[in-house]
Image: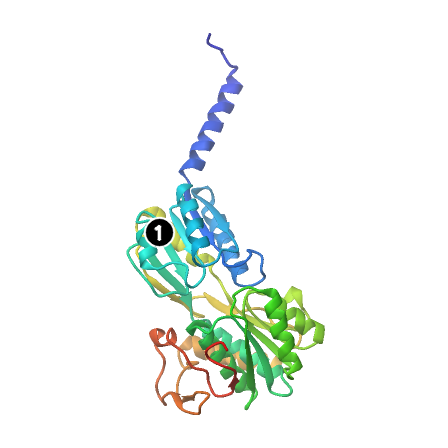
Amino acid sequence: MAVLLPLAAMVALAVTATGSAKQADAFKVAFIYVGPHNDGGWSQAHEDGRLYAQKVLGSKVETTYKENIAVGAQFSQTVASLVAQGYKMIFATSFGYVNKAFAAKYPNVIFDQATGTDQSANLGEYFGAAEDTVYLSGMAAGAASKTGNIGYVVAYPIPEVLRHADAFALGAQATHPGAKVHLVWTNSWYDPAKEKKAAESLVSQGADVLGQNVDSTATGLVAKEHNIPWVGYDSDSSKFAPKSWLTASVYNWGPYYVNQIKAAMAGTWKSSFYYGSIKDGFTKLAAYGPGVSAATKAKIASKEKAIEAGTFDVFAGPITNQAGKIAVAKGAKLTVAQLYSVNWLVNGVIGSSTGK
């Protein structure tokens, strides 16, 4: 028997049906994080980028994230599940997640990976010249150090981290000639317990400023406990140790995500290697803490302008390595390919380049 519905009810059903259709038609994009989305560092910055993209693109896209996903089997299982749910684009936000062989298993899915180099028809790579802003943050660390002994908590001994450690040390030496940067490796991107232990060991060895190239805020909490300055990384984490906070090299992922998703939706996406810069707003410094003097801010600002103008290059030679040998010759500059192959530490860095 047919049931006649009131006009208002029929309209309500039509609206509901249309709304469901729009949701079903939304382009589905997933983000995979190596740590928690609210880690206060690397994954937090990507999450901010995801939220920015969702806000800009609105109902045209449906985004989600998966957190604490390890490289290997867990990542593979996560991707398989996302593809089964209809996700057409996946941002893999950590080194080692995707290679060409893996991407080839899902030819109808677009993969974009942060910090890698492997490319194929459906695999792109993206990162940026954080060595520039890490250098600037190193300047803040050097200026804040009274003894010239600076501690730096680092993750894995890969080119990305090694060049950042080098840049941080070169920046520290620019404001504190002769400064030493002492490394402790955690061999993990996100492990607050290891990072805390590493930071505490650096303080016990005499470090009067702490910096980091890891993802949690544990180093900052140790700095807060010992009332010493701290340079963060990835995100503005000043709220965790406001009195210790100096600044940090941070990333603005959002605009890149918007552009890539738009291209994917339009069917114009092509595999590329994106290397953002200060000039295009991809990498920058976080707000300064109370311990950064006006004079230090002026020095950093001057150097930042020179980097943006192309009149200063962080890795312009001559640069010597730990053994006192020339790593970058006078007049030479490192290309992006060479930056991605750095396997040495500059003179003044105390620690092993192999993570031991």
Residue 311 pos. (x, y %):
40, 81
State the residue at coordinates (33%, 54%): 103
- The residue depicted at 41 percent of the width and 62 percent of the height is 96
Q: Residue at x 63, y 78 (%)?
A: 201
Residue 4 vs 293, above or below: the answer is: above
Residue indicated by mark 1? 110
Quarter of the image holding residue 279?
bottom left
Is 147 drawn above or below residue 18 in the view shown? below
Mark 1: few, some, or many residues within 10 Å (few <14, many ≥20)?
Answer: many
Q: Is residue 254 left or right of residue 236?
A: left
Q: Front-most of 334 and 158?
A: 158
Q: On the image, which quarter does residue 244 sit in?
A: bottom right
> Which residue is farthest top?
1
Give amino acid for label 1.
Ile
Q: Quadrant of residue 274?
A: bottom left
7 or 49, nearer to the observer: 49
- The picture places residue 200, in percent across and down from the top left corner, at 65, 75
